[in-house]
Amino acid sequence: MKLNYVYHLPTLIAMVFSFSVITAQEVPQADKSYVKEIKKLSSQKQIKNAFKILDEIDEQTTEDLIALTEIEAPPFKETKRAVAFKAMLDKAGIDKSWIDEVGNVIGLKKGTEGNRVVVLDAHLDTVFPEGTDVTVQQKGDTLYAPGIGDDTRGLAMLLAIAKAMKQAEIKPKADIWFVGSVGEEGLGDLRGVKHFFREGAPKIDSWVAIDGGSAGRVNNAGLGSTRYKAVFKGKGGHSWGAFGLANPHHALGYAITHFTKEAKKYTDEGPKTSFNIGRIGGGTSVNSIPFESWMEVDMRSVDASRLVMIDSIFKASMNAAVAEYNKTGINDKIELELIKIGDRPSGELPISTTLVQRAIAATTFFDEQPRLTRGSTNGNIPIALGIPAVTLGRGGKGGGAHSLGEWWMNTDGTKAIKMALLITMAEAGLKLR
């Protein structure tokens, strides 16, 4: 799969956190023309009816959330949930639905003009391995289950919007694709959304994703990352009988020392760049010289050029460490293999982008404070290609993402759904009766 990324370097960085605020203004403002547009759209009878319907079906939306949460969707094994989500989209009154070659679910709401495509997306996968207990437990007004907020709530929101559009007889001008995407988490490496932007794929004009965070999140910048599995290989043997033989674990130790020393020098200055050795493995027993040792490394940066540089530092450190270790008088030598296991591009859309302006205006319309953020989401791919894309928060209150104790509370939850509907319809256009 070949993607020709056009990187847009950050220009408005004010402060950087895991999801960094990137605008020079403390609270981003929408131009008056977009404020007026959003207000006018929200006053249309179909939209007002849809808002009312979303409130009326809120209990059903929670039931949908529970039903989907209790269907496992571990990395690279989202099929069962995808099939269920497709069936629920069909029941919601979508015009047509299908599952593509990589497992993405697409539900089509046909536009009256159909000359543009607006995507409304939430990801199907969770970080939890197969066999995780995903039974939803309710304690008071709080729901507990792995994956209930990230991003199963987003899927339930898509279903609610599809139902409200059908019942309120909303007719968009552009085609709207309701997408349940695969591979957003971890080593999935955004494989679902990358498929939508592969060479020769149908043109997508706007991408609106729903993911973690409260109402008011407007993610308009992608936090790029590069990930490798570094594999150190040797012959292996008995710890006593073959003592002195090249040991992959020892070489890996050299590599960690080299890399962390050089990477820290680089990351101590300049726009935020990070590195992390997240997993280490290999070996068969305590009294065996391993034949293989490996580690998985994650590197991130707000700046595309710095991501390239930390990548170069990593490769140089790995090769230098192996060369140094192989000169220590050992028998035989260690071979190194570097396998790229992740590639998420950096990018940023300016605050003046129409979709970003509409998202800010819609957030303000619902009396929420908009927050421009940077994150690693499905939006990374279209943003890096210069295609309008935002990632919105799923609303309500929640916490414990990526943990077994993940929770979500339906505190004014329909507000985020209405917001997503309004932003999507602003992009797609409403056919007036």
Image (cartoon, grey):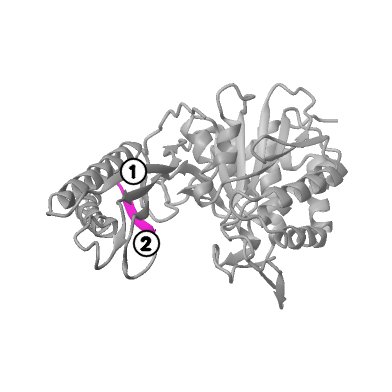
- Locate residue 229 relative to residue 329 in the image: left or right: right
- In the figure, 193 relative to 159: above or below? above
Q: What residue is at 61 percent from the left and 40 percent from the top? A: 208
Q: Nearer the viewer, residue 48 or 171?
A: 171
Task: Say which residue label 2 marks.
Answer: 283
User: What is the magenta range?
Assistant: 271-283
Residue 270 is situated, as x and y percent measured from the top left of the image, at 25, 46
Q: Is residue 223 magenta?
A: no
| Residue furthest front in the image | 241
Q: Which mark is residue 337?
A: 1
Residue 286 is situated, as x and y percent measured from the top left of the image, at 34, 70
Q: What residue is at 81 percent from the left and 42 percent from the top? A: 165
Q: Nearer the viewer, residue 401 or 70?
A: 70
Q: Nearer the viewer, residue 213 or 195?
A: 195
Label 1 sits on what residue type? Glu
Mark 2 element type? loop
- Give residue 348's quadrant in the image: top left
